[in-house]
Image (cartoon, rainbow, N blue to C red):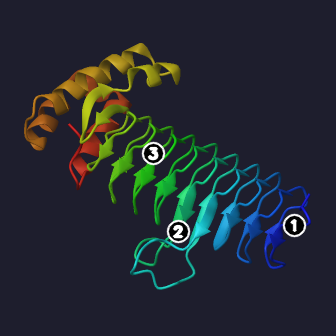
Amino acid sequence: MIHETAVVDPRAEVADDVDVRPFSVIGPGVRLGSGCRVGPHAVVEGNTDLGPGCQVFQFASVGAPPQDQKFGGGETRLEVGAGTVIRECATLHVGTEEDEGVTRVGGDCLVMAYVHIAHDCQVGDGVILSNAVTLAGHVHVGNHVVIGGMSAIHQFSRIGPYAFIGGASAVSMDVPPYASVAGNRARLYGPNSVGLERAGFSKETVEGLKRAFKALFHKKRPREEALAEMAESPDAAIPEVQEVMDFFRESERGVVR
C-alpha cells in the first residue's frame, strides 16, 4: 500500500506489496524489493536498492549524497540486503567515485536510531549497530559484528567478523576478528567469548582464540615476531585462529591492542 500523501517518483521500481507510509519520499533511482516497508516522513533517494523485507522507520534518510567535499555527483550507489531494519533518524549514504562507488549493508542487519553509515562503507550480514553508532567513510565491518551505542569508527578502519565493540568506544585502528574491544581509545580485552559461545563456536575454538590473542596482542611484541611464534603453536591449526593471524598480518592501520 502506498499512502496518498507519500511522494513516489514514477521512475522508482517498487514491488506490488511494498508499504509506503504517509509523507515519505521515494526517489527516481530507488528499487524497493518485495515486502519492504518505508515509515512516515522517511526519505529514500539516490541509486538505492533495498532488498526484500527491509524496513525503514520514520525520519530515516537513506541514499543521500555523501558528506564528502570531493564527491563529484557521479552515479554511485547504496545497496541494502534482505531483511535489514533501519530505525528512526538513521542516515545511510551512497558511495563515491574514489572507492568502488557503492556503500553496502548486508542482510538481516539492525541499524538502530541515529546510526550514521558513511560513503563506501562495507557492512556484512547480521550486524548490529546500536543507537548513535557512527561509521566514517570506507569502513569495513565483517559479518555478525556488534557495535555498542555512541561508538565512533575511524575512516578506513576494518572490523573483523564476530567482533564486539563496547558502548561509547572510539576505534581508530583495525579490530581483529572475534575480538572484544572497548574504550576511548579502544583497547583489546581478548576474544568475544560470550558472543562466540552464543553463536555456537566450540569451547575448543574459544579457548584456542584466548591463547592466540594473548600470544599475538598482549605481549606488546613486534608483529612479525608474534606471528612467527604463533605459527609454531598447535592453535595455528584452528581456522579461526588462522583468520586472526591473517588479519593481523594484512592490517595497514595496525590493530587495537
Q: Are marks 2 and 1 in contact (CB under 8 Å)?
A: no
Looking at the image, is mark 1 or mark 3 nearer the viewer?
Answer: 1
Q: Which residue is mark 1?
A: 5
Q: Earlier in the sequence, mark 2 or mark 1?
A: 1
Give the image location of residue 97, x and y in percent. Answer: 45, 78
For mark 3, give the secondary structure. Answer: loop
Give the quadrant of residue 21. bottom right
Give the image location of residue 248, x and y in percent. Answer: 24, 43
- 117 or 32: nearer the eye? 117
Q: Which residue is mark 2?
A: 102
The N terminus, quarter of image = bottom right
Q: What distance separates the C-alpha of mark 1 from that of mark 3?
A: 39 Å
- 225 or 26: nearer the eye? 26
- 257 or 64: nearer the eye? 64
Amino acid at the residue labelled 1: Thr
- 112 or 200: nearer the eye? 112
- Can residue 208 be seen in this snapshot? yes
Give the image location of residue 218, x and y in percent. Answer: 15, 28
Q: Which residue is mark 3?
A: 142
Amino acid at the residue labelled 2: Val
The C terminus, quarter of image = top left
Q: At 58% across and 50% down in the image, what residue appears?
A: 106
